[in-house]
Amino acid sequence: MTTQQQLQHLTQQQLQQLIQQQLTQQQLQHLTQQHLQQQDSTNNYRSNQTVFKNTDADSAIEQLARRVHLLARRTQENRLLARASRKMVLSRVLTFFSLNPHF
């Protein structure tokens, strides 16, 4: 059975549930992104304060290590968001075809 045939068997209630899940995922992504931006702003402020207070070599190395860690975390989070975004697009496409069976 093809994907389109499977979608044609979905009930209206199941489609509504899929749409609600998609909206919930979008809201969660938005809140997560806001939280990360606030956290990054706080971390950047603290990092800048640390740079001005500590000028010796050890503190500079610690600062670089923190920045590398932050960049690695952002990269991982971006990968997760990209994966979630691809799933959301697929969900939208499937929903579209299920609601428009003449395609």
Image (tube, rainbow, N blue to C red):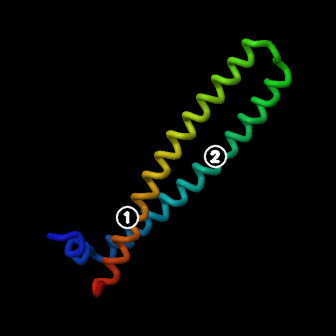
Residue 10: horizontal and vertical position, in percent?
A: 26, 73
* Mark 1 Cα shell of 10 Å, populated few (<14), some (14-19), many (≥20): few
- Taking 90 as reference, is 67 left or right? right
Observer-nearest of 75 and 37: 75
Depth check, front residue: 34 or 80? 80
- Is residue 14 shown above or below 101? above
Q: What residue type is labelled 2?
A: His
Above or below, 35 against 62 in this view is: below
Q: In which quadrant of the rendered view does residue 22 lie? A: bottom left
Q: Which residue is drawn at 78% across and 35% down?
A: 45
Where residue 81 appears, as percent x and y from the top left, is: 49, 50
Q: Is mark 1 on a helix, strand or loop?
A: helix
Identified at 37% across, 71% down, the residue is: 93
| Name of the residue lying farthest toward the left | 1
Identify which amino acid the numbered label 1 is placed on: Leu
Q: Which quadrant does the C terminus fall into?
A: bottom left
Mark drawn on residue 35: 2
Residue corresponding to mark 1: 90
Q: Is 51 drawn above or below residue 10 in the view shown?
A: above
Q: Which of marks 1 and 2 is nearer the N terminus?
A: 2
Q: Where is residue 1 in the image (x, y as percent from the top left)?
A: 14, 70
For the residues labelled 1 and 2, the Cα–Cα distance comes to 26 Å
Residue 49 located left or right of residue 43: right
From the viewer's perspective, is 99 left or right of 61?
A: left
